[in-house]
Amino acid sequence: MIVILLGPPGAGKGTQAEALTQKYGIPHVATGDIFRANLALGTPLGLEAKGYMDQGTLVPDELVVRLVADRLSQPDALKGCLLDGFPRTVAQAEALEAFLAQASPPRSIDACLLLEVPDEELEKRLTGRRVCRGCGASWHTIFSPPPVDNKCPSCGGEIYQRADDSLETIKNRLAVYHAQTKPLVAWYQRKGKLKIVSGLGQPAEVRQAIFQALG
Ligand code: AP5
């Protein structure tokens, strides 16, 4: 099963990913997480991606497509995967479709699930988001405050604010989403693969709606 989790920054893609990967027994492939992990290790890929991420702009298609093709060729992803944050442009979607079609046997995505949340709510979610450097767990300063010592209860990692979660960069990320990623909604609708779920409400409610949409 190959599922794309599509949605604007802060829609809750990362929040919903774990339950989905557990239910469907597929790995979570999140391009943003891969870039951040590379940055933490100081790899050339991480350092190249950093400039784009800090501005809230997209890493060039060619670089992202190569990275995802490599990840999808690994044994655990041959049974399927949950794609989070990829594709983000029509060019990336076309490259994904071509990559899957040339597999033996040919593969294709099962569904593209769009999480819809209004921009005003996204700004609130992202400015308050805090994340664990170790395991990626996330909190919100108002809705689900992190521990006062800023240490993750699960892995002991430091809880921090992502560099791209400043209001200025958030506004830029949202503009980039509307200009470059939103056209994918019509693209997947034309292919008959689009499923739309509201990302508003408690995370558990959103999860149930996603399970229902995916069947
Ligand atoms: P990436 O890491 O993919 O970031 P994003 O898409 O901007 O998404 P986020 O991680 O910010 O949000 P999310 O939807 O996962 O929300 P979350 O669950 O955390 O990408 C970062 C950068 O990498 C990009 O800007 C780009 O530069 C680069 N990049 C990545 N992929 C690329 C690609 N394919 N091509 C080119 N460049 C690429 O939730 C957010 C907050 O809301 C949390 O605090 C959470 O607790 C809270 N929350 C979640 N659900 C709810 C709810 N139902 N109610 C209330 N609060 C909620």
Image: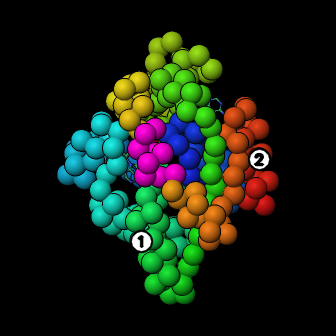
* Discs 2, 1 touching: Cβ within 8 Å: no
Measuring from the top left, give residue 25's x and y in whole percent: 64, 61
Residue drawn at point x = 30 percent, y = 36 percent:
54
Q: Which of marks 2 and 1 is nearer the N terminus?
A: 1
Quadrant including the N terminus: bottom right
In this rendering, the count of numbered labels is 2
Q: Can residue 204 be seen in this view?
A: yes
Q: Of 5 and 121, which appears nearest the observer?
A: 121
Measuring from the top left, give residue 209's x and y in whole percent: 77, 47
Q: Residues within 10 Å of mark 1 (few under 14, many from 20)?
A: some
Residue picked out by circle 2: 209
Residue 177 lies left or right of residue 188; in this view the side is: left
Picture disc at residue 95:
1
Quadrant including the C terminus: bottom right
Residue drawn at point x = 46 percent, y = 84 percent:
102
Q: Of 31 and 22, which appears nearest the observer?
A: 31
Residue drawn at point x = 45 percent, y = 55 percent:
88
Q: In which quarter of the image is residue 121?
A: top right
Residue 179 lies left or right of residue 16; in this view the side is: left
Q: Mark 2 to mark 1: distance in Å?
A: 29 Å
Q: Of 37 and 65, which appears nearest the observer?
A: 65
Q: Which type of secondary structure does the marked residue at label 2 adopt?
A: helix
Magenta-drawn segment: 174-182
